Image (cartoon, grey):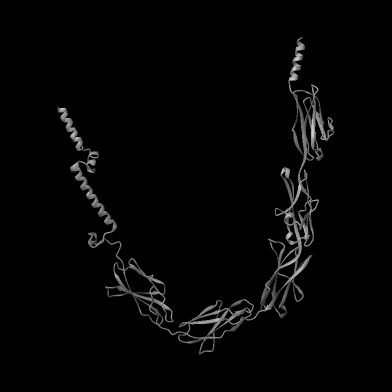
Amino acid sequence: MFWLSLTVGFLFMGLGRAVKLTVSPQSVNIILNREKVVICKVQGSEAESFQWYNPDGVPIEEPGDGHFTVTSTEYSSKLQIRDAQQTDSGEYRCEAEVDSGNVEQAAVVITVIAPVSVSNVDPVRNFDEGTDGVLSCTVTGIPEPTLTWTRESQDVLQTAPGHYEKLRNGSLVIRNITMSDAGIYQCVGTILERKEKESRNTTVIVNYSPKLLQVSPEEVSTWPGRSVTISCSVHSVPPVTITWIHNGQGLPSISRTVSGRDPSSVSSTLEVKVHEPTDWGEYRCLAENRLGQVNGSTWVRPGDFPSIPQDVHVEPNSTSLRVSMARPLSDGHLTLLGYTVQWRLDTETEWSSTNTSSEGVSLGDLRPSSLYHVRVAAENGKGLGEFAPAVTVSTLSQREPDPPSVSNRSRVEGNSYRIYFGHPDNGSNPILKYNIRYREEAAADWLCVSVNVTDAHVLTDLKWATPYILELEAENQSAASPSQQIHFRTPENPHSPLPVNAAMGEGAPLGTGAITGIILGIFLVLFVVVDAACYYTNRCGILLCIAVHVLGKQGPGSKRLDQEMGVTAIR
């Protein structure tokens, strides 16, 4: 009877527990050619058996076929997929027969994926201008990615759909390729569902025939024995061969330079030195590569003498002439080196000469009041050109200078006086010095000083509060000028003690501070008088307050109170 009850109890306990079958994980992604394991578990009972089914409903028998491996126990079954292929994707079903005889089911969704892969892309492709260029690219992945060709982050099919075409195999065709198509292109594979992207670059190089950039200078002039340098710049891919040709013969260049920033830019330099007439003429730069050639020319011509200078002008002084001129209308196609200036007295036949690189020169050490002839010629590398017509001019006579002027900047500075000199007419003779004499107006003797030509001079150690007379004259080699008279007065000494009458306030005006102090003093006296009157009449005021609280005196009220208290006590 005991064993029967125990058996029934265990039976009811088994019936009371829920049986559950689960597969972990419920969905899984497997990368192509990788392996993955999923586990089917039973809870609440033991399993008599497990059975797996592939997406087509075909049983996967234990232990498996190598591609699928099944391993089971009383409570779980493990399914392992090796070398996963895209055909392995789908829903896999696990069935378990439990002790009760029932069959439980659970499923897992397996998806085989592959990351985006970009291949079959050439790093560099060369195409000749005018041909069709094809860029290959293969993009793989699961699910199948989309393939896009971009340049500078722009979809080329959208920027120029007729010029670019994408083939069914993903290759990009560039129709009638030009120099502007050169650059970097990207083949981009994208799986939008996983926001996955991969790309590879290919560089397109476009080969073209040479393009002439510049032949400089277009024309150059020189003279026998002098070298000139000409250059030729070409742009091309592939690189060019540059040949200089003169009179049908090739010439060696002195240098060939490739631009560091743009290797397709090449320049060649040729030095031409003229020794004989056959060296003049055309020099041709011929640049060629396998796609074509280009040439440009420059001419080397004999230079000419410059024409006469323009606007020759002569400004006379007593012993000098200032000559100025303008550039000639023609420099003879050569660099202008300078000017030759010649002069002579009217009574002489020999010319004196000087050279200058500027358009102005001074001629010195000339005779005053004399007639001179002056002529100017321009010079370049070939030589001296013709002289311009001579200019006849007379030097000025010498005399004393005009009285010197004094600038309004002249001023008194304490017990000093600063004089700023003007610039008077020097009488056709340079001013050598300024003569200054000065004295107090009340004095009879003059103080004298001479200063070299300068802009200013300072008279120092003058008496304070004193009027002065100053006379100024300019002197050149001929004589001194008439004098210019100036009156000025020095100020009071700011550091001397005040006079007695000033200290007593006699004759000296009061300042703002003094007036303010006097007013405040009057108010203070009035205040003291009123407060004292208040104290003696009404026993009030500030004086009473000070006496009581500071000096400890008793106020009138306190004294009367004490007296009253004393009377009361006596009574």
Residue 71: horizontal and vertical position, in percent? Answer: 80, 29
- Judge whether 203 appears above or below 27 on screen: below
**Residue lying at the far top of the rendered structure:** 1
Residue 155: horizontal and vertical position, in percent? Answer: 72, 53
- Judge whether 404 appears above or below 536 on screen: below
Residue 312: horizontal and vertical position, in percent? Answer: 54, 82
Question: Which residue is at the front of the view, 131 or 214?
Answer: 131
**Residue lying at the far left of the rendered structure:** 571
The quarter holding residue 476 reads: bottom left
Residue 489 left/right relative to 272: left
Q: Residue at x 76, y 14 (%)?
A: 8
- Asked if residue 184 shows in the view, the reply is yes
- Tell me how many marks there are: 0
Q: Residue at x 73, y 43 (%)?
A: 193
Question: Which residue is at the front of the view, 536 or 366?
Answer: 536
The quarter holding residue 254 reads: bottom right
- Asked if residue 255 shows in the view, the reply is no
- The quadrant the C terminus occupies is top left
Residue 533: horizontal and vertical position, in percent? Answer: 19, 45
- The quadrant the N terminus occupies is top right
Question: Which residue is at the front of the view, 308 or 366?
Answer: 308
